[in-house]
Amino acid sequence: MKSSRAVSIAKPRETGALRFGVIALFATLALLLAPIAASARSAPASFADLAERLSPAVVNISTAQKVERPSFGPRPGPQLPEGTPFEDFFKDFFDNRGGGGQEPRTVQSLGSGFVIDPAGYIVTNNHVIEGADEIEVNFANGDALSAELIGTDPKTDIALLKLTEEPSDPLPFVPFADSDKIRVGDWVIAIGNPFGLGGSVSAGIISARSRDINSGPYDDFLQTDAAINRGNSGGPLFNMDGEVVGVNTAIFSPTGGSVGVGFSVPSNIASNIVDQLREYGETRRGWLGVRIRQVTDELAEGLQLEEPSGALVEDVTEGGPAEDAGVEIGDVILSFDGKEISEMRELPRAVASTPVDETVRMVVSRKGKTQTLKVTVGRLKEAGDEDKPEAAAVEEEETTAEESFVALGMKLEALDREARERLELDPDLKGALVTDVESTGPAAKKGILAGDVIVEVAQEAIESPEQAKQKIDAAEEDGRSSVLLLVNRGGDVRFVALRFPKDE
C-alpha cells in the first residue's frame, strides 16, 4: 500500500522586523508602479462632461440636389372598344398624365461635420456633399445656416465647407490631434447624426491602425468599435482630451448598421488635406515619378535584402523627380524623408503628404548596398494631365539568326525587328523574347507568357537569350534558391522571382 506524503510550507515567525520589511517592500513597489499606473488611462466613470463640451461644435449637414425627372411620354390607359361612351374621356385623362415637362425633383441627404475655426470652416466627408446644389448646416442651438463648398478631395473623402451666413452665437470649434500618438486600445468617442436622429454620442476604443479597405490609394484608416452608422459620415472621432483624432468615413456591415467595425480618416491626413483646400481650394500632393510594388520573400533574396521590406521600383518616369535624383529600376526605397518604408503602400502616403518642391533624403538599396539620394518632390497631376511622350523614331536594324535557349520552363529567342513590329514594342528595347512557356514550369507558375521580354536577370541588363541563359545558370550554380527577372510586357515592366526546381 502506497503512502502519501503531505507537503507543507513552514511559515516564518512573524517579527516586528519582518513586518517592517514587508511594508517597506510594498511601498517601494507602489512608488515604482505609480508612473505606469498614471500613464495607463483607465476607462472614465462617465463621458458626460466631454460630450457636453464637444457636442456644440458637431453639426448636422443636409444637402439638396435637383435631379431631372425622366420623360416617359403619355401613359397607356385601359384598352376600350371603339365607340365606347367614355373612350374620349379616358384618352384625354391618361394623355394629360404624361411624364414629359415635369419639374426636377429634389433629392436630399444627411451627414455630419464639425467646426474647426470660428470663422465658419467646417469639415465633412466628400460623399456627404458630392453633387449637392444646396448645403445647409444645422447647429445644436437651432441655427440652420447655408454653406458653400471650399474644396474637396475624393481620394481621402474629405471636404471643406464655409458658412455663408452669420451665426447667432460665436461658433464653438474643436482642434485636430496628432493621430500618430493614438494607440490601439485607447478610448475614443464619436459624435454625429446617425440616421438623421440628431446629435448622438457613442464610445469605444481604437481597434486597429493603418487599415487598408481598398477605397483609395492613400488608405490608412483608424478602426474603432465605437458605434458608427449611416449619417455619422463626416463626423469627428475624439480622443479623451477632446481633440479630433479622426473623421468618421465608413463602416463594415453586412446589415447596414453598426457591427463594431468603423473606419476614420486619421487627423494627420485630414488636417493636411484641409490646410491645402483652405489655401488653394484643391489638393497639391507630392509626386515622385516611380511605379512600385511590394517586396515579397522571393523577391527579397534576388534583391539581396535581409528581409522583405521597402518599395521596389519597377519603372521610373522620364523627366520626373525620381529620375533627376538618380533612382534606377530595381532600387528598393527603404526610407523617405526620415520615414521608414516597411511596406509598399507606405511610400505613396509619405510622398503625397510632402510639400511640393521640398527636397528630402531618400534611402535606397541598390544591388545589396544602401545609398542616400536627395530628391526634390514634384506635384502630382490628375489622371490625363500629363503630356503623352512622343513616339520614338523607328530605326532599321540588322537581324541575325540566333539559336533559342530554354531555362526555367521558358523558351527564349532573339528580339528581332519582326518581333518588335508584331508585338508593338519600343524599337530601343533590348532583351530576350519569351516564345513559349511550359505549362507546369516555374515561369508559368509566376504568370510569364509568350510575348514577354526578359530585360534583366539578377539585376543585370541582358541583350540576348544567350546572356539570359548564362546569368540564370550562374545564379543556380551560386546556390541561390531563385533568380530575379525584370519582365517587360507591352511596355509595362515588373519584377518576377523564379524558383529553381529542387532536386528530388
Image: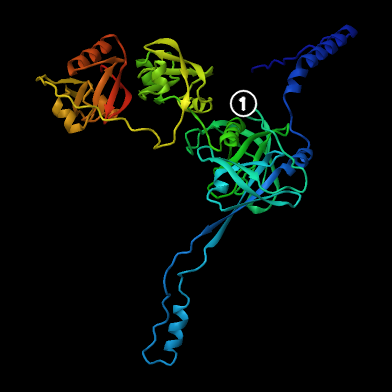
**Coloration of the structure image:** rainbow
Percent position of residue 269, x then y:
57, 31
In the image, residue 195 above or below residue 221: below
Residue pictured at 55% horizontal, 44% vertical: 126
Percent position of residue 331, x then y:
39, 17
Q: Quadrant of the N terminus?
A: top right
Q: Amino acid at mark 1?
A: Asp
Does 345 sit left or right of 451 as displayed?
right
Q: Which residue position holds label 1?
A: 180
In the image, residue 40 above or below residue 255: above
Residue pictured at 19% horizontal, 27% vertical: 394
Is residue 190 at least partly visible in the picture?
no
Q: Secondary structure at mark 1?
A: helix
In the image, residue 472 above or below residue 133: above
Asked which quadrant contains residue 203, the reply is top right
Percent position of residue 268, x then y:
60, 30
Does 154 sit left or right of 291 as displayed?
right
Pick the residue in front: 61 or 493: 61
Pick the residue in front: 485 or 8: 485
Residue pictured at 30% horizontal, 21% vertical: 486
Asked which quadrant contains residue 485, the reply is top left
Mark 1 Cα shell of 10 Å, populated few (<14), some (14-19), many (≥20): few
